[in-house]
Image (tube, rainbow, N blue to C red):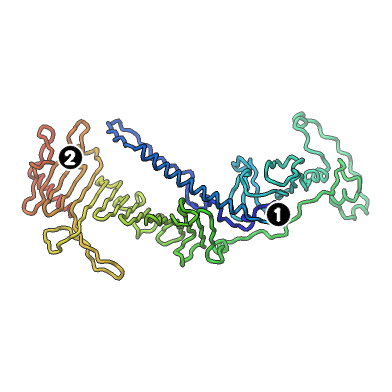
């Protein structure tokens, strides 16, 4: 058929890039719904209702709608300029593409596939101008619907008034086999007796020596008497292909970009494809540069998505947010030096490490490294630890000998700034419930205060099912004065509910806390 200039020249600058090309690793079957939470019958405190300002939401929606209208207006003006360009071959550019008929492989409607780009169009919304013929491996059909335009075109190839087939393959087979068609099912089911065979006449010696002729040659040589139903054999036959079958090896497929990189420019993004196992680009196979939706015409970069294969560190994807200075790296399992790292998120303020579940020996799932704070989460640990955090402060006076647990301040290397020394000020640990231990003896949260003016450890226990007050003990960890702080305002141990630990238990707990702190 016929196609416009930008289709025949593979110019996709005004085409939206499909999602399957921009995000090749996106799983459409994956659900965003969270895990199903089953109730255990216990009382749950309802979450506080989030107060939403409808005025602010309406204002944001109006601003977004106004920005979208401006973008649409600018885009419409640009398209109008393009359509005004005169192309003397507007309706005469011959082109070939693929028609996929509905009915097989779960295809519900007819589709067009552009062979040069792989883009899929609906029949009613395609950019093509007209159709002359349609062919397959079995036949060829000519468009007999008068106008060759796409408007109101029927694709029912069985309707010979609209599509004339060139090859009459079925009639040729009937003439060659000497039968009309298979007998009806009713005749088979009645069990009719076969016709009596006529005895064969012996062949003459000359007839035996004469070469045998095929049914096609025999019928063609007989002239007018050309078969049982007088079917003429002057129809065309499917010719053999003059091309050899394609032989694409793995090496040829990997080196399918002879110029090292192939660039495809779309209206909303730029696609760059590289061959696999290329060390010059650190095993990069595809880079997607997405433009800012509000400034697509200016081609301002918003995001950069890079896909990798066969890397030693098993990194498979990297996403860079240019405006926010944010970077996300995704890793696969298998690289022991990264200790099961699954995702790394970098921002100017923090770093977030996410690990594969059940990969690390310590059961760590996440680690958030922010200035002055480290937060970690765990799962499947024998000690039932689920959360741990560290608070740090920079050291202003390096001669202060009262500070404990000082770290940092290593010798700087070339290109690195000198690290300032820091000291720990607070450690928080949280534990899940252990059913085999009584609630008043099962620690839920332990807080270590490590400050020059405050050296305490606060232990809070799980709340019993029939209780309303949690047991809480505070120990003083000052050198020379380690004891249970019975008069501390946080100590909650009513005598009618809980019992204070004995002196021997207090000494054991203090020794354990000191070792745990280190």
Tag on residue 92?
1
User: Whole-percent x and y of residue 294?
Assistant: 46, 51
Left or right: 455, with 166 as reference point: left
Measured in 3D between alpha carbons, the distance from the residue under mark 2 to the one under mark 1, in whole angstroms, is 87 Å
Q: Is residue 6 left or right of residue 423?
A: right
Q: Which residue is at 51% across, 57% downward? A: 271
In this image, 510 relative to 240: left or right?
left
Quadrant hosting residue 401 = bottom left
Q: Secondary structure at mark 1?
A: loop
Q: Residue furthest bottom?
A: 414
Residue sitting at x 21%, y 55%: 392
Residue drawn at point x = 42 percent, y = 41 percent: 61
Q: Which residue is mark 2?
A: 441
Q: Position of residue 372 (x, y in %)?
A: 24, 55
Give the camera-side residue of 277 and 372. Answer: 372
Image location of residue 201, percent across then percent down: 91, 44
Q: Is residue 222 rendered to the left or right of residue 281? A: right
Residue 151: image tag: none
- Residue at the spot x=65%, y=47% of the render? 99
Q: Quadrant of the C terminus?
A: bottom left
Mark 1 surroundings: few (<14), some (14-19) or many (≥20) residues within 10 A? some
Q: Is residue 102 visible?
A: yes
Q: Quadrant of residue 195?
A: top right
How crowded pointer 2 is (Cα within 10 Å; few <14, some 14-19, many 20+) is rated as: few
Q: Earlier in the sequence, mark 2 or mark 1?
A: 1
Between 342 and 95, which is closer to the camera in this rendering? 95
**Relative to 511, residue 180 above or below:** above
x, y (%) of residue 475? 11, 46
Q: Are marks 2 and 1 in contact (CB under 8 Å)?
A: no
């Amino acid at each position: 058929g016929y196609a416009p200039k930008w289709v025949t020249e593979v110019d996709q600058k005004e085409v939206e890039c499909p999602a399957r090309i921009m995000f090749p690793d996106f799983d459409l079957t994956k659900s965003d719904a969270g895990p199903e939470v089953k109730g255990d019958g216990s009382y749950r405190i309802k979450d506080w209702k989030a107060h939403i300002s409808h005025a602010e939401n309406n204002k944001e929606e109006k601003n977004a709608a106004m920005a979208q209208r401006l973008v649409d207006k600018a885009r419409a003006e640009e398209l109008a300029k393009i359509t005004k360009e005169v192309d003397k071959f507007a309706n005469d550019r011959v082109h070939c593409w693929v028609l996929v008929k509905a009915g097989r492989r779960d295809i519900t409607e007819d589709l067009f596939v552009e062979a040069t780009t792989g883009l899929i169009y609906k029949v009613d919304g395609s950019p093509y101008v007209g159709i002359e013929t349609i062919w397959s491996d079995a036949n060829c059909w000519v468009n007999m619907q008068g106008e060759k335009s796409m408007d109101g075109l029927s694709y029912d190839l069985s309707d010979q008034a609209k599509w004339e087939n060139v090859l009459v393959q079925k009639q040729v087979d009937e003439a060659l086999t000497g039968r009309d068609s298979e007998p009806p099912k009713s005749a088979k089911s009645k069990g009719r007796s076969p016709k009596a065979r006529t005895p064969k006449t012996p062949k003459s010696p000359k007839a035996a020596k004469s070469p045998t002729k095929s049914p096609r040659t025999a019928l063609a040589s007989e002239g007018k008497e050309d078969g049982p139903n007088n079917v003429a054999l002057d129809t065309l036959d499917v010719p053999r292909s003059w091309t050899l079958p394609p032989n694409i090896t793995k090496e040829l497929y990997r080196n399918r970009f002879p110029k090292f990189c192939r660039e495809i420019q779309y209206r909303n993004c730029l696609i760059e494809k590289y061959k696999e196992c290329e060390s010059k680009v650190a095993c990069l196979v595809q880079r997607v540069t997405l433009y800012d939706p509000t400034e697509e015409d200016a081609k301002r970069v918003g995001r950069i998505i890079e896909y990798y294969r066969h890397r030693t560190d098993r990194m498979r994807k990297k996403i860079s947010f240019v405006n926010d200075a944010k970077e996300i790296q995704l890793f696969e399992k298998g690289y022991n030096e990264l200790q099961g790292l699954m995702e790394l998120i970098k921002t100017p303020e923090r770093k977030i490490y996410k690990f594969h579940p059940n990969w690390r020996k310590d059961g760590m799932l996440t680690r958030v490294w922010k200035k002055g704070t480290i937060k970690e989460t765990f799962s499947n640990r024998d000690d039932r630890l689920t959360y741990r955090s560290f608070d740090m402060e920079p050291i202003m006076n390096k001669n202060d000998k009262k500070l404990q647990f000082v770290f940092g301040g290593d010798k700087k290397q070339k290109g690195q700034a000198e690290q300032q020394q820091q000291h720990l000020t607070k450690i928080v640990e949280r534990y899940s419930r252990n059913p085999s231990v009584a609630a008043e003896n099962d620690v839920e949260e332990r807080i270590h205060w490590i400050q020059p003016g405050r050296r305490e450890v606060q232990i809070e226990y799980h709340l019993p099912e029939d209780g309303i007050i949690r047991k809480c003990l505070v120990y003083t960890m000052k050198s020379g004065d380690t004891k249970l702080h019975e008069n501390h305002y946080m100590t909650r141990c009513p005598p009618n509910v809980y019992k204070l630990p004995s002196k021997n238990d207090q000494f054991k707990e203090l020794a354990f806390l000191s070792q745990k702190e280190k």
